[in-house]
Amino acid sequence: MKARIVTLPGDGVGPEVTAVAVAVLKAVAQRFEHTFQFDEQPIGGIAIDTHGEPLPPATLEACRGADAVLLGAVGGPKWSDPNAPVRPEQGLLALRAALGVYANLRPLQVHPALAALSPLKNEKLKHVDVLFVRELTGGAYFGAKTRTSDAATDECKYTVAEIERVARRAFELARGRRGHVTSVDKANVLETSRLWRNTVTRIAAEYPDVKLEHQLVDSMAMLLLTQPGRYDVVVTENLFGDILTDEAAALAGSLGLLPSASLGEGKAGLYEPIHGSAPDIAGQGVANPVGTLLSAALLLRHSLGLDDEAAAVEAAVEEVLREGPHTRDLGGDAGTAAVRDAVLHALAMQAHRSNVYVEGARVHG
């Protein structure tokens, strides 16, 4: 298979973790006899510094022509003034809108070897396997905004079509999992949430094999901490999804562990770890690349249709999480390069075991 992957390393630790993912993707390509072409482009703060804008036209053009986009992180103290007319986050929001990636998938699992790092008691972490589906291109983030000396407004707007498409994505994903969708809103207060609930309920009738329940966002914030194991697929709007997924990430023990995929109608997607640019550790070689590696696995699965290759990356990461080495956020002292090398070694050993099995079959056959 031939594929063109645009990489957007961005700011802070973004270049460090993205480089690890590229190294692993190259190893996958070699093992499975694919050709991956990588095209690095600027975004975020570094793009502001070099091009005067957070999403240069050349970056956008490259992303539109790619089979998939892998992002590191954007932002940092240098560009953190919320009153600045140009900010790194604007580039990411504009990219999501331009690519039409309306569904943000954030899988959450708690690795048994790392359960002690979670703030919750271990018995609450059993069987935690949640897939969040966050609507990504509507709501308050993209609504009209006003600002005067003594007031400000942020419009939260949703259309039926926007809700329908993300709801259908959630129900389709639930069919391949445990068949349970939880829709999160604030329908007791907000008109957009009432539209959301009515629309999701109507779409649910198309999926009689999937169970639907509704939760108010404030109740859901509590239930994620008290009963995380009861949820399968959670679908919600943009702002609520941003908050709830960061809250849920704490269950895993570290933001550095969790991946995300942003998908639209076609195969192309935008893949990124959920952590930020971590400027406090940037350049030190200690960032945890696991979230980016698992994002690369999602890229292989969803955009390139390479399930075996995605599973190989996930198995290699799982082995390293189980056996080590671990970065500082996981209680270890390993650097980014050590984790990279361990994952590459695990991939190589997979290939070796596979070859031994094949040769053994030939001998006995």
Image: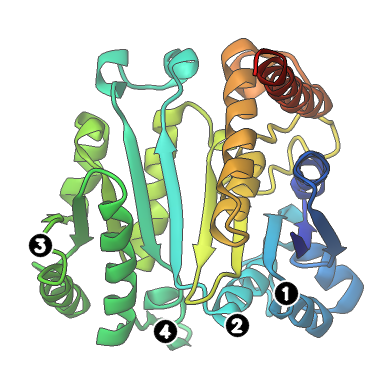
- Horizontal and vertical percent for residue 340? 78, 29
In this figure, which residue is indicated by the disc labeled 4? 143
Task: Indicate the quadrant where residue 291 lies.
Answer: top right
Does the residue at mark 3 contact the one at mark 1 (Cβ under 8 Å)?
Answer: no
Disc 1 from disc 4: Cα separation: 24 Å
Nearer-N-terminus badge (2/4): 2
Q: Nearer the viewer, residue 113 or 353?
A: 353
Q: Please, what is the three-letter code of the amino acid marked with disc 1?
A: Cys
Disc 2: CA contacts within 10 A as few (<14), some (14-19) or many (>=20) = few
Disc 4 residue type? Answer: Gly
Answer yes or no: is residue 10 visible: yes
What kind of element bears circle 4? loop
The label number, if any, that marks residue 63 in the structure image: 1
| Tag 2 and tag 3, C-beta contact below 8 Å | no
Judging by the rendered image, the residue that carries numbered circle 2 is 98
Q: Earlier in the sequence, mark 2 or mark 3?
A: 2
| Separation (CA) of disc 1 from disc 2 | 9 Å
User: How far apart, in angstroms, are the residues tagged by discs 2 and 3?
Assistant: 34 Å
Mark 1 vs mark 2, foreground winner is 1
Residue lying furthest right:
50
On screen, residue 158 versus residue 205, left or right, reads right
Identify the element where label 2 is drawn.
helix
The residue sitting at 28% across, 50% down in the picture is 233
Verify CB contact (< 8 Å) between mark 1 and mark 2. yes
Residue tagged 3? 208
Mark 2–mark 4 distance (CA, rounded to whole Å): 15 Å
